[in-house]
Image: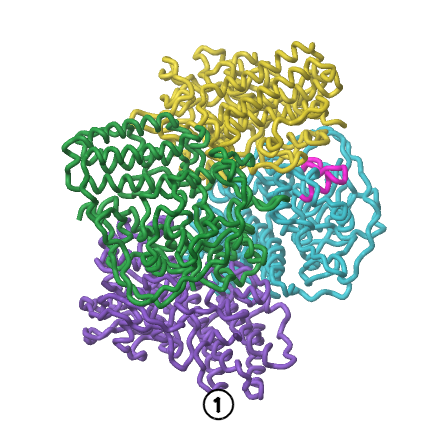
Chain colours: A cyan, B yellow, C green, D purple
Amino acid sequence: MTSASLLTATPLAAATDVLLTRYQAVRHQTEALCRPLLPEDTVVQPVIDVSPPKWHLAHTTWFFETFLLAQFQPGYQVFHPDYAFLFNSYYNSLGSRVNRADRGTLSRPALDDVYAYRAHVDERMRELLLSQAAQAEDFASLLELGLQHEQQHQELLVTDIKYILSTSPLAPAYLPASSDSQEVSRPLPAAAWLPVAGGIHRIGYEGAGFCFDNEQAPHETYVADFELQNRLVTNADYLRFIEAGGYADFRYWLGEGWELVQQQQWAAPLYWVQKPAGWFRFTHHGLLPLDLAAPVTHVSFYEADAYAHWAGARLPTEQEWEIAARQFRPEAAAGTFLESRSFDPQPLPADADPTQCHQLLGDVWEWTYSAYHPYPGYERAAGALGEYNGKFMLNQLVLRGGSCATPESHIRLTYRNFFHADKRWQFTGIRLAR
Amino acid sequence: MTSASLLTATPLAAATDVLLTRYQAVRHQTEALCRPLLPEDTVVQPVIDVSPPKWHLAHTTWFFETFLLAQFQPGYQVFHPDYAFLFNSYYNSLGSRVNRADRGTLSRPALDDVYAYRAHVDERMRELLLSQAAQAEDFASLLELGLQHEQQHQELLVTDIKYILSTSPLAPAYLPASSDSQEVSRPLPAAAWLPVAGGIHRIGYEGAGFCFDNEQAPHETYVADFELQNRLVTNADYLRFIEAGGYADFRYWLGEGWELVQQQQWAAPLYWVQKPAGWFRFTHHGLLPLDLAAPVTHVSFYEADAYAHWAGARLPTEQEWEIAARQFRPEAAAGTFLESRSFDPQPLPADADPTQCHQLLGDVWEWTYSAYHPYPGYERAAGALGEYNGKFMLNQLVLRGGSCATPESHIRLTYRNFFHADKRWQFTGIRLAR
Amino acid sequence: MTSASLLTATPLAAATDVLLTRYQAVRHQTEALCRPLLPEDTVVQPVIDVSPPKWHLAHTTWFFETFLLAQFQPGYQVFHPDYAFLFNSYYNSLGSRVNRADRGTLSRPALDDVYAYRAHVDERMRELLLSQAAQAEDFASLLELGLQHEQQHQELLVTDIKYILSTSPLAPAYLPASSDSQEVSRPLPAAAWLPVAGGIHRIGYEGAGFCFDNEQAPHETYVADFELQNRLVTNADYLRFIEAGGYADFRYWLGEGWELVQQQQWAAPLYWVQKPAGWFRFTHHGLLPLDLAAPVTHVSFYEADAYAHWAGARLPTEQEWEIAARQFRPEAAAGTFLESRSFDPQPLPADADPTQCHQLLGDVWEWTYSAYHPYPGYERAAGALGEYNGKFMLNQLVLRGGSCATPESHIRLTYRNFFHADKRWQFTGIRLAR
Amino acid sequence: MTSASLLTATPLAAATDVLLTRYQAVRHQTEALCRPLLPEDTVVQPVIDVSPPKWHLAHTTWFFETFLLAQFQPGYQVFHPDYAFLFNSYYNSLGSRVNRADRGTLSRPALDDVYAYRAHVDERMRELLLSQAAQAEDFASLLELGLQHEQQHQELLVTDIKYILSTSPLAPAYLPASSDSQEVSRPLPAAAWLPVAGGIHRIGYEGAGFCFDNEQAPHETYVADFELQNRLVTNADYLRFIEAGGYADFRYWLGEGWELVQQQQWAAPLYWVQKPAGWFRFTHHGLLPLDLAAPVTHVSFYEADAYAHWAGARLPTEQEWEIAARQFRPEAAAGTFLESRSFDPQPLPADADPTQCHQLLGDVWEWTYSAYHPYPGYERAAGALGEYNGKFMLNQLVLRGGSCATPESHIRLTYRNFFHADKRWQFTGIRLAR
C-alpha cells in the first residue's frame, strides 16, 4: 500500500494546465487571506490551539515540498535545512519538530522569508506540474491531498486570525465592517421538526472524487426513526437559554462541562460581550451588535449539549445527520462559505421554506454526539500520511457540514471534522434532534 | 418521574427477610474485604483515582443513609452532621463536599468511627426493612440500587487496595500467597477466531431484574459480519508485543497514547517488574512470577489498541461484544469473580473447547472501541440519582464483562462499565476482533 | 576534615551512663508525642511541608542507624534493606529516596513495624554506648548531633500533628482541653520600646557545648542604634491590623506576599476561624476562642512584614535580635517550651516588668528580616553531613528564639532556624523593631 | 512626603534646553536599539521574563505620560484610553493591567501605532519642558526618574532581543558580526587576589546626583579583612569547571540549584552550544566561537556559587564589593557599556596591571551573595512610585557593577541591581572573593 492510499477514491484525471490553475488558485487564496494582516499579527500564538498565520503559510508549503517536490522532483534540494524542524506539524515519521506550544515564540524566519519560501516552492511546483514526473502514479492523488490540506489551513487561518485579533482590548477589525453589518435581524419563527425514517442506510464516501480516509469505508448503519430541526439554533434561541440561567444550573451539563463552566467562568459563547447597550460579538469586522436571527456559533460541545438538554431535545448522531442530509439534498451554494468573505454565519431568510432542511452545508460546523472513531473497514495508510487522521481517533467529537470559513469546494455531506468537546474558536454551532 | 426511575426495570418483589439477608450479606462482604488491612492502609490516596478504603466504607454507608433512611425513616437524624460533606462523592444536588484529590488527607474520622457509622446505619436499616415503610413504592428499587452501588465499591476496594499496597517498595501482600501461585503456566495455544453473523440485532437490558439506566433503552443495532477471538489475550501474547518493540514504535499508537508512553515511560502493563530472574507482577499476594497463560491485565485502552494494531486486528465495539456474548451464552460461573478471592484473572485450561467463546464474564474487563455515550432513548433520572451515570457520558470508553474483582451477582451481558483511556489500575484486558 | 566537623564546638565529655540516659530520654520523648495518635494519623501528608508522624519516627531512627551504628558497630546489618530508600530525607550522598511529596502515599511499613525498628535500633545503640567503640573520636559528636536532630523532629511532630488534625472538619483534639483554656485573657498594655546601643558586636556561637554549623564562625558585626519591643505582638494587636483592612491593602505588602494573599485568600493567620460568636483558633485541644493576650502565631513572613509596615515599624535583623537578646539575658525557663505540653504560646502576665525584654526564648519563632545565608567563615562539612544545613542557605529567612514546640534544652540565643517566607504551619510570630 | 522622594538626592538644577537634549537623546537611544528589528521580532514573548520590544517601547512612554504629562500638563488627554491597561507593568496603585505572561499574545497595537504613541508623547513632553510647568517642584526629579527608567529598559531590550532571536534554530544575527569577532583570544593568566582591609566602612549613595531609593540610606557597615580577584572569571576558567564535571556533582550546589540543574538539564551557561568544532555561543552577531579570555556570562547565581565552591572560594557580599570598588576607584570608561554596541563582555588585555581591580563597571553584572533587602533607614515612597523598588525586596540577590548592556551614564558604584537566583538571560557573571 502506498502513501496515496489516504485517498481511497480515484482522483479525476485532469489536464496538466487545469491542475496548475487549480494549484495556483488555492495557493493564492491562502495569501489573500493573510494580506490584511500586519507582520505583527502573523507571529503570535495566544493559546495552544491557535497557530501563527506565518506558521500556516509555511507549513502548507512544507507539505508540498515534502510530499511532492522531494518525492517527484529528481535532485530537489530543500529550500532551507531547518524548515522541516520548524514547519512539520505532527508527523513523527518525519522527525522532531518545534513543540506545538512554542510556535508563537519564533519571530524568525521573517514573514518575507516565508513568502519567499512560498514563491520558491510554487515555482518548483509549476515546473514539476509541467514535467513528465507529474504523470507518476501517485502524483495526482498527492497533489489533491496537498490542496485539500491547504484548504483546511485556510479555514484555520480564518479562525486563528479572529482569535489573535480578539485578544487585544482594542478589538481591531480584520476588515472594515460593511454598513449593513450593524443591523440586527428580527428573530426567526420557531424551528420546525422534520421527520426522517429509520432503517438501514448506507453512509460514508463512495464517489469517484476526493475524500479523506476517515470517510471510508462506506457501510451500512441502522437508525431508528428520528426528527431533525429544519434550521440551526439562532442567537435568539441561545439567548433564551442564557437568560433562563442555563450556565448556572448543573443539571443540564455533562460533568466535565460543568467543571469548565465554573473554572473558566463561561456565561455565554466565546466572543460575546455584554455592554449596557446589549450583547455584542467580536467579529472579523470588530465588535458588532448580536444578530438575533443568525446561527449561534463559537460554542463548545458542552454548551451545545447543555442547550439541547435544556430545550428538551438532543444533538444528532453523525449517522442521523448524514442520513437526513442525503435525504434533503441541500443545495451547497445556499450556505455561507469562505468565498463569501463574510466570515460569519448568516441568518436564514424569514420566508425560508419550513419543510426544507436549511443550512446543512456552510455557516457553522454542527456538533454531533458521535465520537470520532474509525468507520468499519477503516485502514490507516502506511508511511507519514497514515498519521494524517487515524491517530486522532479518540476523545474527539464529529462535526458535520462545514462553516462560513470552509472553502465551498472543500466540503461534502460525508466530511467528518473533529474537535475536542471544549473547543470554541472554530465556527461551531447547534442543530437539534429528537 | 421519580428518582427511582434510575431503575428502569421493576425489581423483583421480595419478602422482607430475604431483603434483609441480602442487605446484610452485601454489607458484610465489604467489611470482609477490609479485614486484612491495617488502619494505616485505609487512609492513603496515592493517586486521585484511588480512594482510601475508609472512604469507601463510609461513602457506601452515606448512600443508604441519604437515599433510604433520610427518605423513608420518619424523623431520622443523621449520624454526624459533617459526614455528608466528607462522604458525598460527586452529587452536586446534595451540596458541597471534600475535593476528590483531598480524600487521602483526612485521618479522621478514625477507622473505628467509620465502623461505628456502618453499625449504626445497618441497625437503622434493619429496623426500616422490618417496618411498614419498606413497602413504599420506591423503597425496593432504591434498596437494590444501594446494594448494587456497594458492590461497585467492592470492586474498587479490591483494585484500590492493590494500588495502595503497591506503592511501597516492601511489596506487602494483602493475603498470603498460596503455594501454587508461584507456578507459571505454559502458554496457551493460539487463539481461534469465531465468526459472528452481522445484521440487525437487539441489545440493551430488557429483563425484569435490576439494571443501571445506562443499559437502556434496549434497541436495534446493525453490525456487519465479524470475528471475535475465543479467549482473552494472555501475558505470553502481550510479552511478544513488548519484545517486538511495541512500546517504542509510534506507528501502533493513537497520538495521545504515544505521548503518554513517552511521558510516563510505559514499557509494560502496570505492576509488571523486570528482574534478572524474569518478569514479575505485583499482586494481592505480593510479587509473583508472571503467569504466561493468564490473561494480560492492567493495560490502558491505548495499550490494548496498540497491541491490536500490532497483531493485525482491532478491538470490538460494544455492540459486537454484546451480540457475540448473547450468541455464545457464557456460563457466568465459568469465569473468575470476586467471590473466588483469587484477586487475579486465571488461565484458561489448556483443553478448553476452541469452538466456544471463553472468559466473557469475569477475569478482566474487556476494552471496547466504543465511546461511553447514551443509548438511543436514554433518559437521565430527575434528582440526585440523575447524576449517577448520565453526566459521565463523554470521553470514556465502554468495557464489558466484569473482572475477577466483580461480585458474580453484579455482572450482566448488558453491563456497561466505563473508564478513561489512560486508566490501568482496574483489572482491564484485551480481546481481539476483526 | 571529618564529618563531625558539623559540630564545631567540642561536646562535653560525659560518662557513658549519662549519655545513655540522655539518649533514652530523647528517644522516649518522641514516642510520648506520638502516643495520643491513632495509626491513621501517622500516615497522611496533607501538604508537602508536613511529613507523616510515622515517617518522623522512622527517619530519626534511620539517622542513628546510618551515622552511628553503621559507622561504629562492626558488622552492623541494617534492620531492613529498603528503609534507607524510605527514610532518607534529603542526603544525596546517601542515594536515592522516596519523593518528599510521596511520603503520605506509603501505608507500609506499618506503625508497629516502625516501632519495632525503633526498638531494634535503641537496643543496638544501648550496646554500642556501653562498648569500647563509644570512645572513638567522633562518636560523642555524632551522638549529640543525632539527639539534636531528633529534637528538631520533635518540634516538627508537634506542628505536623496539628496540621494533620486540622484538615478534618471534625476539628479533633490531640489532647483534651484543660478547663482554663476556654478563658480569654484581657489584652495586654501596649508594648514598650527598649533601646539597644549600636556599634560593633560579636555574634555567633563560641561556647564549649553543642551548636549547629550554621551558628559559626562567631564574628563581629556592626549595627546602628535601634529599639526593640519588650514583648511579642499579641492576637489583640494583630486583630487590629485585620480590622483595619490590612489584608486588603497592597501597600503594606511585599509583591510576592500580595499575590499570595489574593491567590490563597488569606484574611487571618492560619488556623483562625471566624464564627458568629467571634474568632476561634484550631489548637492541639480542638477549636478554642482566641486568647487576646497570647502572642499571635502561625503567620508567614509576609504577614509579619505587612503588620510591621502597618504599625509604622519593621522586623529586626537577626544581628539586632541576637545583640539585644545577649544584652537582656533572658531566663530561658521563662518562656513556653515543648516540655510544658501546652502546645500554644502563652500570654505574658499583665504585671510583667516593662523594662525587661520578654518572650525571647520559647513561645514563638520570631521572623527576622535576614536572609538565611552563611556566616563569614562558614564551612560546609565534608560528606553527607555537609548537606545538613549548608545547601539550604538561599531564599529562606532566619527565625530566632524557639517556640512552644521546641525542647527547652535544644534552644540557644545563637540558634538560627530558617523557613521560606510563605510558611505558616510552624509556631511563628512577630516582634517589632525600629 | 511626595512621590519624588524616590529620588532622595536632589537632582542637579539644569537649564531647560539641556534637559530637553538629554530627554531626546535617551528616547532616541531606545529607538535606535529597536531599529534593526523586524516587526515580527517586536511582539513575541518566548518566556515570561522577556517582554516584547514593542511593549518596552510603549511602557517607557506610558511612564512619561502617567508620571509627567498627566501630572504637570493641564488638561492632558491620554493618547489612548486602553494603553494604561496595556502598558502598566506592575503598579497596583494605577489599576488593572494585562497579565505579564500575556504580553506576547498582543499583536495590536501595531508597531507603527506604538511609534506614533512615542512621537505624540515626545512632542507633548517637548512642549512641557519648554513651559512654565517644568519649573514645578517635583518635575525635574520625576523627569530624571523617567529617563533612568527608560535606560533600565534599554538594558532589558538588549537582553530580551537576544533571547527572542535565540529561540529560532536559524540563529539570526541582530547585527552583522565584525570580522574580528570570529577570533578567539588566548586564555588570560590566573587571576590575582587583591587584599582589602576590613573594619567599619560607609556604603550607599550620598552624592548630589540621582540615585534610586534602594541605594539609601547611606550607612556604616562592618566587614572583616577579605580578598577579591582582580578580574572576572573567564570562559576559559568556567570551561575547566564544566570539564571537571561541575554540573554533575551535587556537592558544589545549593539544593535548589541542584534541582534546577537536573530539571533543566543545565550543562553550560545559557547560549552555549557544543559542536564538533568546539564550543560556540549565541550572540547579537549570531553564533560565534567561544572567546576564552572573555568574561563568562549568562550564568545563574546557582552556577556562580557552584563555580566559586569548586574553585575553593566564594562570592563577595555586596558590602565587600562596594568597599573594594570604592578603594580601587575604577575608571568607569574602562569597561564595556551599551554605547560600545558590542553587546558582549570583552576580554581584559593580557597586559592589564595585575595590582588593579579590573572590570568593576560594565561587561557583566556580578552576582553577590547578598539578599536584596532594604538598607537600614530605607523608606518606601508614598504613591505609585513606592512600588518601584520596595515591594521586590525579598528572595532576590544583589548584583553590582552594570554590564555591556547598561548605558554608561546609568551605572554607579552604589547601584543595586537584583534578580532571582535562577535567572540567566541578563549579562550576569562572576568575581571571586575569599
Q: Where is residue D372 in the image (x, y as percent from the top left)?
A: 39, 63
- The front one of B197 and C201 is C201
Task: Please check the rendered image and state whether residue D369 is part of the magenta-colored stretch, yes or no.
Answer: no
**Which residue appears at 27% of the width and 30% of the height?**
C121
Quadrant where the image shows the N terminus of chain B: top right
Q: Where is residue C127 in the image (x, y as percent from the top left)?
A: 20, 28
Magenta stretch bounds: A303-320
Q: Is residue B319 left or right of residue B138?
A: left
Residue B204 in view here? yes
Residue B301 in view here? no
**Which residue appears at 19% of the width and 73% of the height?**
D354
Quadrant where the image shows the C terminus of chain B: top right
Q: How crowded is mark 1: few (under 14 residues within 10 Å), some or many (20 or more)?
A: few
- The front one of B319 and B412 is B412
Residue A191 lies in what quarter of the image? top right
Q: Give the chain letter at badge 1.
A: D
Q: Main secondary structure of the magenta part?
A: helix
